[in-house]
Every structure is written in structure tokens, then in C-alpha cells.
Amino acid sequence: MGLIVQKFGGSSVANAERVMNVARIVTDTYKQGNDVIVVVSAQGDTTDDLIAKANEINPNAHKREMDQLLTAGEQISISLLAMAIEKLGFPVISLLGWQAGFNTNSIYTQARIKSIKPNRLQAEIAKHNIVVVAGFQGINRYDDLTTLGRGGSDTSAVAIAAALKADKCQIFTDVEGVYTADPRKVENAKKLKEITYDEMLELATLGAQVLNNRSVEMAKKYGVELEVLSSLNPIPGTIVKEAAKMEKMLIRGVTKDKDVALVSILNLQDTPGIAFKIFSRLSAKNINVDIILQSFGRDGTKDIVFTVNKYNGPLAVELLEDMLDGCKIVCNTEVAKVSIVGAGMESHPGTASKMFEALYESNINIQMISTSEIKISVIIDAEDADRAVSAVHRKFIPED
Ligand code: ADP
Ligand code: ASP
Ligand code: MG
């Protein structure tokens, strides 16, 4: 018995039958004597559909108006879920992000939570209500609605669990936990019993959509243990927790990220300070650069190649063309990043070569490589990405 935060993603509340299914999970937890706060996402593809509607009218709409629109998705699902819980005969109240005390900064569509004012949540819990909270949203200091970035409901749930020191934070989704690769794409993907915050953070950042990376960052910061589990199959899921309590595995997972653009600057003047000029120009426009490669200087010129998020590719080229004369700048968006993640690789030499061998055996060319203590990433042609994930997965994770 205690306080339990349960989060349900879009597919878990996609239609009336699924909403009733969630109501049963929540009320079963409540019946066992727990206080329950439920965080829900918009139903099914609602958020995508709302974005498409906006684009039909004005693809360059102000982001404030996007947030006015997108927050509507979660408003629908909280009220429907509250009605379902009421129908089962339990006391319930639904709250929008601002009613639940979510204060954020003012970066519309990518806002960060600054604080949670817990009074209302605590008052409703004290009245023994099941509280259903709209994920993905908050309010800024101008009393405007904001959203937390795609997949942000995970972060809403972790933030509540941290603020109210919940005993459990369960993330219910449409797969049975965190797998060694996307179980919808890789046949032999294995469910993990547990994973460390650091590994999960890398997997989430490198393309495993099952948890939002900011939610993992926050869970680590506040020591919130997470369980990722299925809303359709009541079996234990995957626990995300501190490394100290866990055996190291060489590879915890393989990911793919197709939202990558490769920008090449060719025949650049080989003078001191040029890299500083280029990357400070990009950072001034909030363009995050990931992997950077620089060639040796030759005949007074050199090449610099780097990756950015696909959506920032054209802007990066435009900014650099304005600034650099006499060199050629090309942007290739037909690339993908494939990565392996695992804390065990720190103490296992040869992990990188094993990954490269898998790619070589599948005749896949590597364009860039980047490594850190617990991950290795390669940039390859986008059309090879799925084959690469399967080949690398086969190399490291034994088949049944
Ligand atoms: P929700 O709507 O519940 O937030 P998401 O669609 O955001 O769900 O995330 C769940 C999806 O993440 C799964 O359907 C699965 O296809 C995908 N996924 C990608 N990589 C992984 C992984 N390593 N383990 C589990 N699921 C993954
Ligand atoms: N509905 C939002 C999205 O689709 C938030 C979420 O699902 O977590 O991104
Ligand atoms: Mg999600």
C-alpha cells in the first residue's frame, strides 16, 4: 500500500474498450488500498492528427498556438478515463496540467518543467479520489499552456512521482517492457528484466521510443524507480534503476535513429578558429551537433562533416552558406544512426570490432563512428538501417 503513479500511453487509451481496460487496471490498484495518480497521453494518433490539421492551415504557425492545439488531445483522454472510472463506481477527478500544478518555462512545444505545485494533487488524494492527470502539458509564467515535447507524458508521470515521493511509478505501454531492440522490428528482441538509468537514457536518446529520454534523466536525478509494462498483458515488465543493484551486460540494446542529417563542408580554409566559428554559429541558433569528423588539412584546406537532427539540416546549411565563402556545403538526410548500448562494454575490449564485423558481413558501409563509455554509434545509409540493426543484434544477442 502506498502512492502509485501509473502512466498510460496513446495506444493504451486508443478507443472506448481500451479506456475501460485502463479504468480496470487503475481501480484494481486502488482497491488494494493504494492512492493512485494516473497520467494519460492523447488517444491513439491524436497528437499526430492535430499536427497534420495545423499544417494544412499554416505550417509556420506560432508555437504558442501549436500548444493551445496539442494540449486538447490529453484533455479528451483524461475526461474519458475519469468517466470510465466513475462508471466502475470509484471516486475520481481529472485535472489538466495547470490544475495539477505543472509550471514550465516558456519554450513552447519543448517546455521544461520548472516545478510542480502539489497542493491540488495532495488535496484530491486526501479526499481519496483517483486523480487522472493530463500528461505532456503545463503552464508558463504568462498563464499560457505549454507542451513538453513529443513523448512528454512519460516525463509528467516521473515528475509527479518525484514531487510526491511516490512508492512506485509504472509506465504502461503497448509492449511488455524494454527490449534489446524494437520488438516490432527485430524478431529476436529479448525483454530485459532490468536496465540502469544510464543505459536507458542512452537507448532513449538514440532512438528507443519506449521511454522519453527526459523522463529517464529526471527519474535518475530523483531516484524514481520505473517499471515499463504492458497495459494489455498483466505480467512483470522491465525495471529501470540504479546501476549498483544490477549485473552488467555487455550489450543491453541496439537502436536506430532515422532523424539524422549529415552536413559536409568541403574545401574549408584551414585556419585557426574556423571550427569555433562554425559551431558557435550553430549553437547560437540552438542547433545541437552530434558527431563531428574533421579531415587532415591538405593544400590549405580541410573538410568538416557533422550530424544534426534531420529537421535542423536545411537551417544549418543556410547559416553556414551565409558565413563561409568558397567551400561546398552539402546536406544528406538519407542517413541513419545505429547504436549499441551497454555498461559492460567498458570492460570488454573488442566490442566495437564485433559491431563493425556484423556490418561488414552484411556489406554495410560505415560513414562515421562515435563512441562513449557505454555506447558505440555508426552513421550509415538510411536504407541499410533495419538490416544493420538486425545484423548487429544477431551478433551480440544469442538467438533462442
Ligand atoms: P506510448 O504510446 O505507450 O507512450 P510509444 O509508442 O511512445 O508508446 O513507445 C512504445 C513503442 O516503442 C513500442 O510499440 C515499440 O515499437 C517502440 N520501441 C522502440 N524501441 C524499443 C525497445 N528497445 N523496447 C521496447 N519498445 C521499443
Ligand atoms: N501525446 C503526446 C505525443 O504524442 C505526448 C505523449 O504521448 O507522451 O507526443
Ligand atoms: Mg511514448
Image: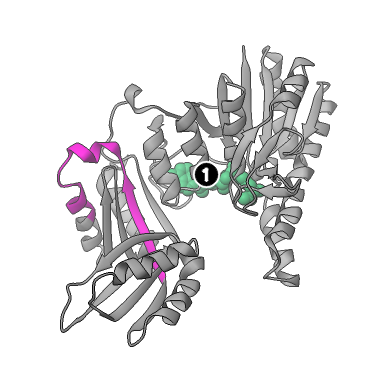
Estimate the x, y position of residue 248 in percent, counting from the top left: 28, 31
Estimate the x, y position of residue 122 in percent, counting from the top left: 72, 21
- Report which quarter residue 201 is drawn in: top left
Mark 1 is surrounded, within 10 Å at the Cα level, by few (under 14), some (14 to 19) or many (20 or more) other residues, namely many
User: Which residue shows up at 40% across the image and 74% down it?
Assistant: 332
Let me know if residue 335 is in the magenta part. Answer: yes
Q: Under 8 Å from ligand 3: the CB of mark 1?
A: yes
Name the image quarter holding the C terminus. Answer: top left
Residue 21 visible in the shown view: no
Picture layout, residue 210 above or below residue 391: above
Estimate the x, y position of residue 199 in percent, counting from the top left: 37, 39
Q: Which residues are magenta?
A: 334-355
- Report which quarter residue 281 is drawn in: bottom left
Picture layout, residue 49 above or below residue 1: below
In the visual, does 153 lie left or right of 185?
A: right
In the visual, does 199 lie left or right of 59?
A: left
